[in-house]
Image: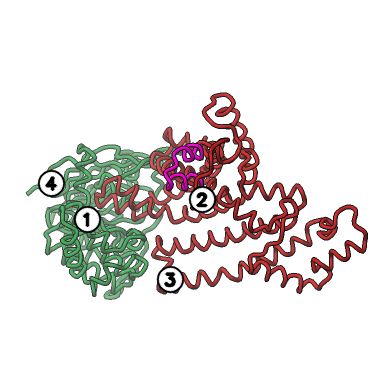
Amino acid sequence: MGLGRYVATRVLLVLPTLFGVTLITFALTYLLPGNPALVKAGPLATPEHIREMERQMGLDRPVPVQYWRYLSGVLRGDFGESATTGRPVLQDFLQRVPATLELTLASMLIAIAVGIPLGVVAAVRRDGPVDHASRLLGVGGVAMPTFWTGLLAVYLFFYHLGVAPPPLGRLSPGVMAPTALTGLYAVDALLTGNARALGSALHQLMLPSLTLGFSVMAPVTRMVRATMLEILESDYIKAAWAAGLPRRTIVYGDALRNCLIPVITLVGVVFGFLMAGNVVVEIVFAWPGIGNYAVTSLLTKDAAPIQGFVLFVAVVYVLINLTVDLVYGVVDPRIRLR
Amino acid sequence: MRPLLEVENLSVAFDTDEGTVGAVDAIDLDVRRGEILGLVGESGSGKSVTALAVFRLIRPPGRIAGGSIRFDGRDLLALPEEEMRRIRGAQIAMVFQSPRTALNPVLPVGRQIARLYRLHQGCSAAEARRRTLEMLGLVGIPEPERRARDYAHQLSGGMCQRVMIAMALATSPRLLLADEPTTGLDVSIAAQILDLLRDLGRRTGASIVLITHDLGVVAGLCDRVAVMHAGQLVECADVRSLFREPAHPYTRALVRSIPRVDREVTMEPVPGVVPSLLDAPPGCRYADRCPDVLDVCRTVKPARSARARDHEVACYATEAARVAAPRG
């Protein structure tokens, strides 16, 4: 099978999954307690008023018709309206996604840049000091929930040491947001040469991304270490030693390249986890992302944004899996050609 | 002339939680220039470990517990790691047991060979590529240019082994260790691979150590044979005398275990199992399986003594019988 056909099949397979996801988010409307018409009509509404509202919202129609309306709305980019902000959910989302994306990317960068080398060294120098340290970090990262490490970080770095800014959003007060290009403040500031905004954005990013990065670094390190240990025992690594290849080539070329194949899956999962699982950290650091939005909506029983959030997260996961599959095809020749 | 490889009194031990496993017990082994030496024995007799020890690639918990390995007069065990690395692949090469898993799955096979030319001979990329294709043709791979771009999983087992041999011979090593190079291959493919090894060995003048448990292969290919049992070297002889007059009871049992179609002889498996090497008692490790066992066998390891020219055996019983026998 050629690369083109591989990609095409993969992309086509995504469609049924996305269809299934809309079914689930639609079903959520029924699973959530309370009558949306009642919420919308307000506490003083008369029964006639409520029925009128139900008619307006289409809640008196048969379920398949309601689903069709929902689906066609979603396809047109209409995810309903937030009762809290009074704006279309899509608009609210587009405004908040960059914040979450920026935090996610920064955390991933930390997790990968530290986690992979740490895992490699831990495997190569098994039971050495680095291995023990990575084990300790791993246990800490997995065992401590992010709201706890986040608060701990704020307490230590902001309150005690004073090296971090107050945990209040993406920019220090008084700093203007850089010209929007990507929506990622740090990137935009860099592209427009706005040093003041860049410094502030990075400074604000520091603690939340370290908190999240620390929590997801552990599985990355463990996996790299375990895979690496297995690969270092494999026949082709023995053959590479016997062929006189230098240690550096063997470890960082032959072994690491094979090791990255399973790691790519994990990185995909971690990315999805961070996009959806930022919720708590976004609250702790008052980060204006979609997790924060979802929690606020949940607390006010605002259905449309929650539906939108679930759908969004599902789509992110599907896209990540698609990307992982495609990347696999590039790095692992055995998959592409089967 | 001095042998190319001189292994003297080599012991390899693995430290485990239960105790020390003496995988190789004080063996002496010479590999002469240009010869094909068969190293035979059952699984677990220490053949592969001996080969890895020559490469100095025994990894913890294993260690070389004693002895010396001289290659062309140089003491390999005393070399700094960097110098040893330059010898690996360039002067001593290895063909592995399972060719498919011994090739890196994510590198095209051509690249795996080409980089050895660049590493060991300092070739340019273009020169390395040219020589790679030439080598692939030499080991009998059709359409080398196309095959060079293939990955291991796209090639048959026989093709993988040819690639492995091309890789091992790429830099014209003077000693080639082939560890069960025909495991898992069809009989006809196996025969081709063995022929290939012999031809290439002759052409380049390299010495070959063929590690195998198949005495049939040894008979057809080797000049001399060394027989290992449970980490000990029990007999070493030129191939004719070993098959004509196997001296050690274990060798005799091995020879009897060869299936034959040309004679009305029943095939007999070697009785007993390879003993545990964990904290093995002193003495001959074949003692418990041996029909001719003497008391001394269990307490003192028999030394090797010459029976004839190019025929040495380490066995008290054989020695006693020879001394007792009337000279004729």
Tag 2 residue: A180
Mark 1 residue type:
Leu
Tag 1 residue: B116
Label at residue B72: 4
Gap in angstroms between the C-alphas marked 2 and 3: 44 Å
Front in this rendered view, residue B12 or A8: A8
Please check whether the numbered discs 2 and 3 fall on a single chain: yes
Gap in angstroms between the C-alphas marked 2 and 4: 71 Å
Mark 4 residue type:
Asp
The answer to whether residue B106 of the structure is visible from this angle is: yes
Task: Please report whichever mark, 2 or 3, sits nearer to the chain's N-terminal start.
Answer: 2
Residue pictured at 57% horizontal, 53% vertical? A272
Gap in angstroms between the C-alphas marked 3 and 4: 47 Å
Tag 3 residue: A338
Please check whether the numbered discs 2 and 4 fall on a single chain: no
Chain holding disc 2:
A
Q: Chain B is drawn in which colour?
A: green
Q: Colour of chain A?
A: red
Horizontal arrangement in the rendering, residue A311 relative to residue B225 (left or right):
right
Chain holding disc 1:
B
Please check whether the numbered discs 4 and 1 fall on a single chain: yes
